[in-house]
Amino acid sequence: MPTAAEPSATETGSRPPTAETPAGAPVDAPAGVRARAEAPARNAAAVLLAVAVAAAAVNLRPVVTSLGALLDPVRDGLGMSATMAGLLAAVPPLCFAVLGICAPALARRLGPIAVVTAALAAITAGVLARSFTGSAVVFLLLTALALAGVALANVLIPVVIKRYFPDRVAPMIGLYSMALSVGTSLAAATTVPLTNALGGDWRLGLGVWGLLALAALALWLVVLFARRERGAASSPAAGPHVKLPILRSRTAWALAFFFGLQSTSAYSAMGWLPKIYHDAGVSESASGVLLALVMAVSVPVSFLLPNLAARRGDQRLYVVVLGLCGIAGFLGLMLAAGTVPWLWAVLVGLSMCAFPLALTMLGLRARTPGGVTQLSAFAQSLGYLISIPGPILMGALYQSTGQWYLPLGLLALLLVPQMLVGLRAARARHIEDEAVG
């Protein structure tokens, strides 16, 4: 797709062949010369889009992790019960499931860049507005608005990567995953200190993340206007749209269940981990730092893992290693959360790298951007739908028992089926072959 900086047809090929420059050289240079002249503009556009992808990724998790760090004051300020707080933790996967279904149609009609831009607008509006409400219900709805934007971006950023960086899918997924981890750890580590610095008002501590989203939105608006995208058909790289019978693909189903089970662990941990540590005698600020450590561990791993996984062909080894790390981490939290708390945080952080692994497999299990769009929408929508009961059940179990043994034991147990379906999803297959074969 041409960028705004690239010359139009009238600028490159419509002048008479005899027209000359002042130096006497023909205006119509050979194709190779024109390509070399246009290369800097294309490279600049690619760099801008890569930066925009990273900026968007940084904003996809503070919606959740900043709330996790301030969950107790938010509950007190809005009068939430533990069960309703569990419902709040379940809103992310619910939004991802519902909105993910709409993402492919929106991308075909408007183009993925336009939809991601609109998604960042929803994140900005939801995060800023929820900080000013005094109603728990309105807070929930505005959080859902922000998470609707996160849902669309979750599905479509891998599509943007597959379409515009077809030869650099693994490193771009690594950049995207690393930026996700940076945003998550940044919000977890700094939300409580920021809130204290702003006078202790949790509303300001949550609302400040809307300003970061606003900056990313401005960057995507530049990308949108520079590329002037008009739906999927506008890009030659997109290829013809062919709707696959994806329900016939065993790999697609395995990826969906893998997404669902890893999301259950991830969103339960992000929503409840500070509370788990606080109940074990760790201070509120230290609990936030430990959640940040969970995310910080995944920063370098999220960058390296997609490249390593793509080179290996199949990713079964990584599925098993990450699953075992999660089992050890959740059992450690269950039995001795206050003892060597950093160790459990590191292990849980490693297990949460199942998310960048799943994103990598999305890009590897389909041959075309259209296939990635359909696989991403199916696997993420169904997967997040599967994960909805997890955070709610954790809140209900904690409220009924007053202890974290059962909730954490459940998370450890669920990693066993996660590894089993992950072994199937990690095999070197393409959904196009399974769907028609």
Image (cartoon, rainbow, N blue to C red):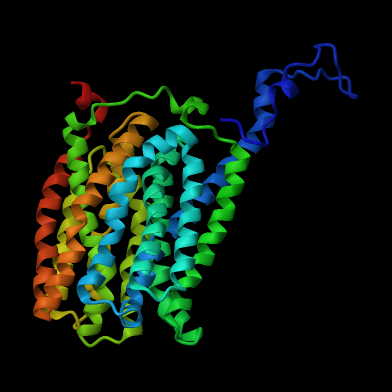
Q: Nearer the viewer, residue 383 or 251?
A: 383
Q: Is residue 170 left or right of residue 396?
A: right
Vertical placement of 419 versus 346: above or below? Answer: above
Counting from the top left corner in percent of width and height, residue 82 is at 21, 75
The residue under the point 72% across, 17% down is 13
Q: Residue furthest right?
A: 22
Q: Quadrant of residue 412?
A: bottom left
In the figure, 32 relative to 396: above or below? above
**Visible in this render: residue 259?**
no
Tally of numbered discs? 0
Q: Say which of 102 and 32 sits in front.
A: 102
Relative placement, left or right, of 141 versus 217 is: left
Front in this rendered view, residue 63 or 39: 63
Q: Is residue 342 left or right of residue 420?
A: right
Q: Picture coordinates of residue 234 (x, y %)?
A: 52, 27
Q: Position of residue 414 (x, y in %)?
A: 12, 58
x, y percentage for residue 16? 81, 12
Name the quadrant of the N terminus: top right
Quadrant position of the C terminus in the picture = top left
Name the quadrant containing residue 106: top left
Asked if residue 183 shows in the view, the reply is yes
Residue under the image location 50 percent in, 54 percent down = 121
| Residue 108 occupies quadrant | top left
